[in-house]
Image (cartoon, rainbow, N blue to C red):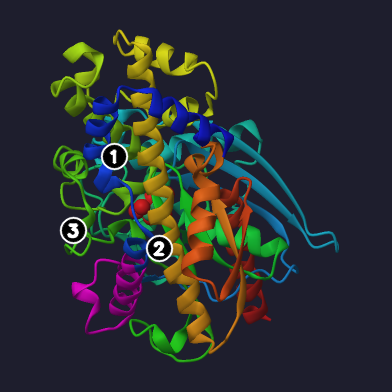
Amino acid sequence: MIASHLLACLFAELRHDQAQRVDKYLYHMRLSDETLQEISDRFGKDMEKGLGADTNPTASVKMLPTFVRSTPDGTEEGEFLSLDLGGTNFRVLRVKVADNGSKKVEMENQIYAIPEDLMRGSGAQLFDHIAECLASFMEQLQIKEKKLPLGFTFSFPCYQTKLDESILVNWTKGFKSSGVEGRDVVSLLRKAIRKRGDFDIDIVAVVNDTVGTMMTCGYDDHNCEVGLIVGTGSNACYMEEMKNVELVEGDEGRMCINMEWGAFGDNGCLDDFRTEFDVAVDDNSLYPGKQRYEKMISGKYLGEIVRNILINFTKRGLLFRGRISERLKTQDIFETKFLSQIESDRLALLQVRSILQHLGLESTCDDSIIVKEVCAVVARRAAQLCGAGMAAVVEKIRENRGLDFFRVTVGVDGTLYKLHPHFSAVMHETVRKLAPKCEVSFLQSEDGSGKGAALITAVACRIREAGQH
Ligand code: GLC
């Protein structure tokens, strides 16, 4: 609050005509409560469409069934491996789950880089690399001789028909390996491991990071029925009534739905709220027209929106004395972490200047103030949009259960949510306003996706073993 007040004061000190011009171009990014309510309503309608068998093909939110039907009950135990692909890093984990009354989970993990050429090379190379990292991790822990159950957190849109089969619909977040879309990623991983022949593994479950996060938080808090990620990408999952999940047989109980909410708006229903800057980011991205909501919210794109605004303002003579540096012309050069840093800089605008300097930009004090305002507006809108989606989700669950009042916990993970100084507060406030009949708590998960995959694997193993006796 203090920071935003200061910013307002600083902004007010700008030359009046300059502030007015800046405001004119940022105006469409400032969303009113009515607009947010409208977006939330449209979101709710698209969720319904995604769940219906006949309407699913034209829904932008695909509402993918995950075949995860229950949260852990605390009786799971054993030693598991997890792979986590799809966030900032690729990780391999060993997770030990103990049923000793204290619900103890021990984890060791190793982070591996996925070089950019592998993200956009052939799928075979990508899966060979994953198998290689797994081998090196098992070697290090001296567990290569064991055939351990593995949960694969693969955080991309996938059609699942069972827990251990997952067909990639399309890549998101900068990945574009050839020959993977339309294929089962479990088979691709098994093939890469078999080809090596130096270890064996029992792949039990493929899990989206939202689902892993919900599971991890659900282990400690039984009210946790929603998972949210706001990191490189953004997405949510929640427990839906089976009778509403028309894509899967059966009416009993509930199933976790991976909403793939980043695709909201791909059918045009967000077009009246997208600005010329959003359109520019989308047009120049790896997948134009796809993941439109995600492109307005998540870490992979916010820096790009800011960069586009800065270029536009400079061309209009509003910034940097009209001179655009070569570096600023480079796609993705304005990292989303700069938004967090710039907004954490309360007084001296020193961070802003040093970041701008790093981008080859000679800035005046007025420039820094404007850049800071741009970052604030872009991040605030992202948080509000995210809140509008979340309000629709919790309202849907409340209505499903015919409740006048509904208390729920949302498990959350992701760098933007965790590191940005205001994102979480603005998002929470938006949910509170748009879903007044729900009391929503947000629980941050630590290492949620990898641990969650292990917990889902543990549940599946428990059920499998019970079936064998
Ligand atoms: C992207 C992916 C989705 C994932 C999200 C967060 O939207 O498509 O599967 O959950 O990023 O990582």
Q: Is residue 410 above or below residue 285?
A: below
Q: Amino acid at mark 1?
A: Gly
Quick check: 200 above or below 66? Answer: above
**Residue 202 in sight in this render:** no
At label 3, counting other C-alpha atoms closer than 10 Å, the crowd grade (few under 14, some 14-19, many 20 or more) is few
Residue 51 is inside the magenta segment = yes
Marks 1/2 in contact by CB < 8 Å: the verdict is no
Q: Which residue is mark 1?
A: 174
Whole-Å distance between the Cαs marked 3 and 1? 26 Å
Image spot of residue 68 (x, y percent): 51, 71
In the drawing, does residue 205 fall left or right of residue 58? right
Name the kind of residue labelled 2 in the image: Gly
Q: Residue at x 48, y 35 (%)?
A: 133
Q: Which residue is mark 3?
A: 272
Q: Position of residue 366 (x, y in %)?
A: 34, 17
**Badge 1 or badge 2: first in the primary sequence:** 1
Vertical relation: 434 (above or below) 128: below
- The CA distance from mark 2 to mark 3 is 17 Å
Badge 1: residue crowd in 10 Å (few <14, some 14–19, many ≥20): some
Frontmost residue, 434 versus 155: 434
Q: Secondary structure at mark 1?
A: loop
Name the residue: 29% across, 73% down: 46
User: Is 7 situated above or below 427?
Assistant: above
